[in-house]
Amino acid sequence: MILDQLTINKARLSERVHKLAKVGKIGETGVYRLALSEEYKEGLELVREWMDEAGLKTRFDHFGNLIGQLEGKNPDEPIHMIGSHIDSQPYGGRFDGSIGVLGGLEVVQTMQENNIIPDRPIEIISFCDEEGHRFGKGLFGSRGILGKLDPDELDRTDKDGVTRKDALKTFGCDPNQLHKSEYDPASLGSYIEMHIEQGPYLEAKDVPVGIVSGIAGPLWLTIELTGFAGHAGSVPMHLRNDALLGASKIVTALNEIVKTDPDAPTVGTVGNLEVFPNGRSIIPERVRFTVDLRDIDKERRDQYEQQLRDCIANVANEIGLQYKIKEDTNNAPKYCNEEIIHSMQKASDRMGMDVPILMSGPFHDALIMADACDYGMIFVRCKDGISHNPMEYATDEDISIGTELLLQTTINMTTSN
Ligand SMILES: [Zn+2]
């Protein structure tokens, strides 16, 4: 029923989504479009053509972001920004990021065609290197425009030894002019991002779209346990300092800790583990593993982190291990702006939809933008919750409904009537 009431041009949007998917295509449905690569450039140039076609003022900035601007009635008013990214994982899908950029573009193009002039400027932005695969650190474009890059950020290298600095130069950016592409946070009024859910919630609820309540803050730790190697045949059990045994106890404990409250969305994962010397007949001397802990409730996450740290100390003491804990990333969870959520709800009511509110476990450029302005997010259902995988799939219908919601919300937020 909603589909026949769409204001946006579903055919145009779908065609663009599938055309962009051909740039850096791998296999039947996969995408390989690493940040600042040739495929990335080709994809962005295609998006730029479409932005030009939509009558936007377009530019590449020095971070490798693409920006298309629709001027509003009051050019000096804070910008309403809509964005996402078109770079991908090395073995990525067609919809991750892309639908947010192309959906945003469809929104402003529809507004133009219907003579809806926003009170303030609207910018569609395709952020560079959200994924972070190539240089090991993502959200580059969004951190860049807010002046939040690390001091060594440009010296990071990819697997071929190419620095981010050189990759930016090859792309056509001037790394010495980065400051010129920064935004004064006061010039940003609001930020909205539409993204595939990358999880199974909407599918289970049998709804095409959801409104995001906030983005869980990730805490990333690297833990190193050191024991003592020995012959697996001769050292009696009570004399061992087995680092892998310690790691196993900690992995299991983390799993228990995050499940303390079964109704909470807390998640904890050990996704990488290295054992040294890693031999069948040698008691493991050293184990290094990662922890990824996420929650929308910072207080609860802090509490779980403390429990985990206590557990590590206890296990190390029990088995006779040395340990080191390194904090790699610590982002606070960020709640979406209540008014934006309300505006989305109003729009979805008008569209005759009952749209659930859900949290985002994955982070997005919106997590960074949240530091500068109010933000909101729309999620689009994706099949089996699969993402970062060529099997990632969202229907043209669901993407169109999400984009219509993006349009109606944008009209609510940027026009006075
Ligand atoms: Zn993404």
Image (cartoon, rainbow, N blue to C red):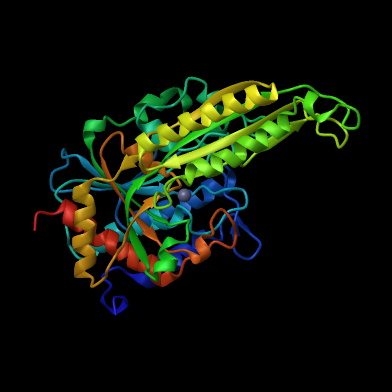
Is 300 drawn above or below residue 50 in the view shown? above
From this viewpoint, is residue 128 visible?
A: no
At 29% across and 76% down in the image, what residue appears?
2
Q: Is residue 51 left or right of residue 252?
A: left
User: 207 or 163, which is in the foreground?
Assistant: 207
Q: Pick the quarter of the image with the N terminus.
A: bottom left
Task: Give the residue at the far front of this rendering.
Answer: 238
Q: Is residue 228 left or right of residue 39?
A: right
User: 1 or 4, which is in the foreground?
Assistant: 1
Q: Position of residue 114 (x, y in %)?
A: 20, 65
Q: Position of residue 412 (x, y in %)?
A: 17, 57
Q: Position of residue 188 (x, y in %)?
A: 24, 38
Task: Give the residue at the far left of this rendering.
Answer: 417
At 40% across and 61% down in the image, what residue appears?
380
User: 25 or 95, which is in the foreground?
Assistant: 95
Q: Position of residue 69 (x, y in %)?
A: 29, 47
User: 244 or 340, which is in the foreground?
Assistant: 244
Which of the 4 image quarters holds residue 133?
top right
From this viewpoint, is residue 390 visible?
A: yes
Is 55 drawn above or below residue 251 in the view shown? below
At 61% across and 29% down in the image, what residue appears?
157
